[in-house]
Amino acid sequence: MKFRSKSEPAPFSAIRVVVGYLIAAGPVGSGTWRWRFPTTLALVGPGSVPFALVLLFGQYAMFREDYMIAWGALPAFATAAAVVLARFRPVEAWLLVMASLLATLFGADFIGWLPWPLTSPNLFALMVVLFALARDRHPWYGVGAWVSYFLVGAGAIWMSNSRLVTIVSDPVWNPTPTPATDSLLLGSLFGAVSFLIGLTVRISRQGRARVAEEEQVAEAERHQRRLLEERTRIARELHDIVAHHMSVITVQSSTAEYRLADLSEEAKAEFRSISGQARESLAEMRRLLGVLRSEDEAGARAPQPGPEALRGLAEAVDRAGTPVSLRVGELPEGLPETVALTVFRVVQEALSNVVRHAPGAVTEVEVAVADGWVAVAVVNGPAPVRAAGREQSAGGVEPDSQGLGLVGMRERVSLEGGTLETGPTDEGGFRVRAVLPVEDRSSVEESL
């Protein structure tokens, strides 16, 4: 049965998408944001439009009123754009930060107590971009960006010491000869911290990605191993059937010279040869079965079940609380034993899935023969509402704890040259239908 979650109202969905663009809390445009610690950090991180607007107005006010830069709107916009662009292209964002820094360095008519050349908005933009470079690019990008800022700061100190710029020093508010020294110290320190934080995030992401990739590989390997185990189990079951036929050939060929009169010596020798080869084939099959069988598994000696055992299987499932309606048509007397075993296993696996996934669901099982084909259909309705945690069990049904019921069915049916169809029904249940050939099996034997 499929359940659909209630759709989110359109206004709220639009708000989520808008917030996803304004705050870097998830993939661009997805709107997957929550008020949690990472989202709160994203308010002042790479791609945050609100934080960029704050830096834009703050930087523009400082350029216009304090530094007397008439064209200060351009470097202010570069500072704000760098914060937004850092989410997508941190290298280009770093170039914008450097452009704004150089504009302050060469264009400011400043007073000595003002920070120079690194303003407060530029410091925040510098930290955001260095964090983004370390997080999203190779570490050498971040190292190069930090070194380039250090060189600009050192150049500012050299310019002030060489009297290439005029610094108005105030012994009360600013006893330091040049503010470039403080700018270099603060920018280098906070930039290095931001770079290390971004590098830590990058390493953490790469670790999680590697773990997820290893889990996928391990899951694929587990699935392949379970599939091989399922095929081995099918081969073990088919051994008894093939061994029975080989035993009949051995007995008939061994007793032919005593049962049939007037046999020539050539015919007797031929029967003895057939008998010897049949015995050798049986011995090889026993050795093969020893390889397929696990060390702690005892060899099964009971006859393999067929359609005649379906009645008991259905009754066992019905007693367990899952009503089963069974209809078995008239099957031919010469039904191959491998087909009979496949019919039973398909029904068994299908009922096992019903018991596990839809306990108590009304189930219909039908086995019929038409035009040289055996058709097996198992259809169940939706599961009734039951108490949580209640488990169902039924004798004769072997639930596939590895989740390979459908895979096992498909392997068995394809081995017989048939087809298998599975899928949900319109009523909320599930349907399994297998079609197996019983008359013309030459094509199947040629493909084996």
Image (cartoon, grey):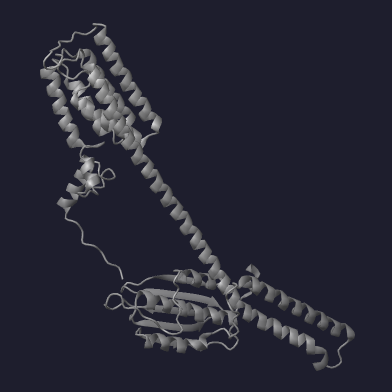
Q: Residue at x 49, y 61 (%)?
A: 222
Residue in the foreground of this view, choosing between 110 and 323: 110
* Above/below status of 437 relative to 327: above
* Above/below status of 147 relative to 417: above
Q: Quadrant of residue 138?
A: top left
- Give how far across and how far down residue 111 sits, in percent: 14, 13
Q: Quadrant of residue 428?
A: bottom left
Q: In what quadrant of the picture does the C terminus appear?
A: bottom right
Q: Quadrant of residue 132?
A: top left
Q: Residue at x 77, y 85 (%)?
A: 253
Left or right for 308, reference 101? right
Is there any visible trace of residue 16 in the rendered image?
yes
Residue in the foreground of this view, choosing between 285 and 363: 285
- Give how far across and how far down residue 425 sits, in percent: 35, 72
- Give how far across and how far down residue 413 sits, in percent: 53, 73
Q: Total of numbered circles in the picture?
A: 0
* Above/below status of 438 relative to 94: below
Q: In what quadrant of the picture does the N terminus appear?
A: bottom left
- Give how far across and how far down residue 16 sits, in percent: 20, 48
Residue in the foreground of this view, choosing between 254 and 202: 202
Q: Residue furthest right?
A: 265
Q: Residue at x 62, y 71 (%)?
A: 292
Is there any visible trace of residue 89 in the rendered image?
no
* Above/below status of 159 relative to 149: above
Q: Residue at x 46, y 89 (%)?
A: 312
